[in-house]
Image (cartoon, rainbow, N blue to C red):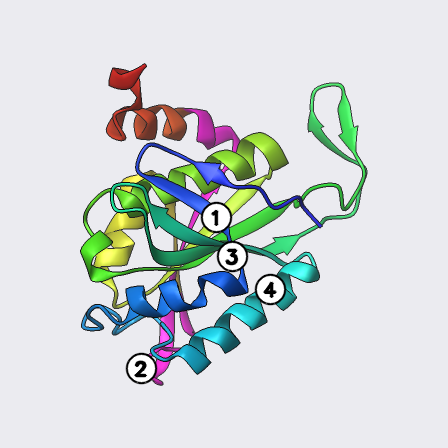
Amino acid sequence: MPAVVTLSGRLVRLEPLSLAAIDDLVAAACEDRSTYAFTRVPNSRDEMASYVETVLAEQAQGRAVPYAIRWLNTDRIVGATRLMNLEYWQGPLLWSPGSLREVGESPSVADIGYTWLSVSAQGTGVNRESKFLMLSHAFETWNVHRITLKADARNERSRAAILALGAHFDGVRRAESRGADDTVRDTAFYSILNAEWPAIRERLYTRLGYAEAA
């Protein structure tokens, strides 16, 4: 199982998800639910407790690394996200010139998903920096081959945000899953490859204002 560490930026701190965050997550989720049409976000304490317990079980199996998103400007937890669908390919594999890693030391590929934010944190840069921190961890610590990002094909806002990261549009898988509105969902798939990360990292670094602060 990969080590679970806190990821810190200028706007946000991604804290390992725990049962202690449940009440803060409920408060964030209940600010205004009008933007959750395409995203499953628990809306009661019991639902949130079940949500957190389920993902912590996946974490214990080495399948996910979940985070609570703390917005440093307000010192409030404003949502959640996770590295998920972790796959450990058979090895040893060539990860970089002259080095081999045995299977299971780090994930080989992963998804970033189940991201949701309170209304007050949307459009503030919190989502972008959260994604940047997870991408940096996945590519630079785990050295993954690929990160996958997905969105309901109808969710133009999420799709635009993924493209703004620099991800490649891979296509739409029809009837891929059950949607948050209980319809049959078509899902748009995007990916970033290890070889693409340095250029994407440079662009995001500038967009996040890190270059000016250095």
The span from disc 2 to disc 4 (Cα, nearest Å) is 25 Å
The span from disc 4 to disc 1 (Cα, nearest Å) is 13 Å
Instruction: Identify the mark at residue 63; answer none if there is no mark.
Output: none
The local secondary structure at tag 3 comes to: loop
Q: Please name the residue that numbered disc 2 is placed on.
A: 181
The local secondary structure at tag 1 comes to: strand
Q: Please name the residue that numbered disc 1 is placed on.
A: 15
- The reply to whether dot 3 and dot 4 touch (C-beta < 8 Å) is yes
Magenta residue span: 173-198
Comparing labels 2 and 4, the label whose residue is closer to the camera:
4
In terms of secondary structure, what is the magenta stretch mainly?
Answer: strand
The span from disc 2 to disc 1 (Cα, nearest Å) is 29 Å
Q: Please name the residue that numbered disc 3 is placed on.
A: 17
In percent of width and height, residue 91 lies at 80, 42
In the rendered view, tell whether residue 88 sits above or below residue 51: above
- The reply to whether dot 1 and dot 3 touch (C-beta < 8 Å) is yes
Is residue 81 a member of the stretch shown in magenta? no
Q: Earlier in the sequence, mark 2 or mark 4?
A: 4
Determine whether, in the image, residue 49 is placed left or right of residue 170.
right
Is residue 186 a member of the stretch shown in magenta? yes
What amino acid type should be assigned to the residue bearing mark 1? Glu
Comparing labels 2 and 1, the label whose residue is closer to the camera:
1
Residue displayed at 36% across by 80% down = 44
